[in-house]
Image (spheres, helix red, strand yellow):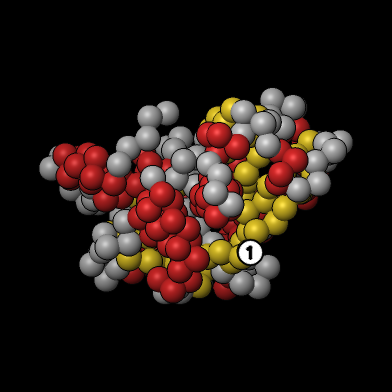
Amino acid sequence: MEAFTRREVLAAAAGLGAQMPAREPLRLGLTPVFLDNDLLLLRGLQHYLEAQTGLPCRLIKRRSYQEITVLLLAGRLDAAWICGYPYVQFQDRLDLVAVPSWRGAPLYRSYLIVPADSPARGLEDLRGTIHAFSDPDSNSGYLVTTALLLRRGERPGSFFRHVFFTYGHRNVVRAVARRLADGGSVDGYVFEMLREREPDLARGCRVLRRSRRFGFPPIACRRGEAQRPAVRALARALFTMADDAGGREVLAMLGLDGFVPATPALYAAIAANARLLAETG
């Protein structure tokens, strides 16, 4: 998929914003993190949000982070569950609504994975191999590994023999397990959930490296819209999800503790890696 500059994304967003429809339902954008093809989860989330906010709810999914980011910036969504990388790229245009808490904290890691029987013992052993990334706007599925290489004076395109994007963390795991790639960069939360729920798939891979912890992918809205009634209702519903039986069922399906408030400081490490990438081109 063609990558776009920040200016091009903003221009596209401005064009969409001119066609913005009347805001009646709560429109929540979802990116392919762990929600892929899980209809039971999506129905449970929609039902919970409608019951708690009193608003009809539309869950809007797209294949890439970029597509959801454009819709959010254009005002075609009230909020979206995005990644920390798009958030820091457009931090001047976005406000945080809530962030998931996983295993006691709003944090997660990026994993570098290889086939289970791979002889690789470190990143250097992957030089000249095929590598699967999730999405060019993913922190765990692209930025973390790219920044690691940049700090070593390397670039993905020259360090690896070939790289490709799968547009889904599950798809990275599938690609590595099926040996379509010699290694992959994946969301650690997703990988741990797959270990629990799709163990046959996860067993085909081994974690080669775990990154430091980063701010978990947040729910964000456009700058200045956090106090809009629909967004405030969404925030309340998220913050109280663990107190409601239906909400707890959704959290159990997601493998999350709940949702908590967040500040931009939670994403400082991602912002540092994004600056490094921008500065080195």
Amino acid of disc 1: Arg
Q: Which residue is most to the front?
A: 153
Q: Is residue 53 left or right of residue 223?
A: right
Q: Residue at the location (40% across, 58% down)?
A: 275
Q: Is residue 276 visible?
A: yes
Above or below — where is 120 with respect to 86? above
x and y percent of residue 68 in the render? 37, 44
Q: Which residue is mark 1?
A: 212
Q: Is residue 81 left or right of residue 199?
A: left
> Furthest residue to the left?
18
- On the picture, is 65 further left or further right than 209? left
Residue 273 placed where, x, y %? 47, 58
Closest to the observer: 64 or 117?
117
- In the displayed structure image, the side of residue 122 where residue 97 appears, left or right: left
Q: Residue at x 34, y 47 (%)?
A: 69
Image quarter of residue 78: bottom left
At 53% from the left and 41% from the top, the residue drawn is 155
For mark 1, give the secondary structure.
strand
- x, y percentage for residue 92? 27, 63
Q: Residues within 10 Å of mark 1 (few under 14, many from 20)?
A: few
Q: Which quadrant holds the C terminus?
A: top left
Query: Residue at (45%, 68%) from the top-left corner?
Result: 268
User: Which image quadrant for residue 1?
Assistant: top left
Q: Could you say where residue 120 lies in the image, as x and y percent from the top left?
A: 80, 41
Q: Using the image as rendered, state which of residue 143 and residue 197 is in the foreground.
A: 143
Residue 65, above or below 51: above
Establish if 249 lies above or below 142: below
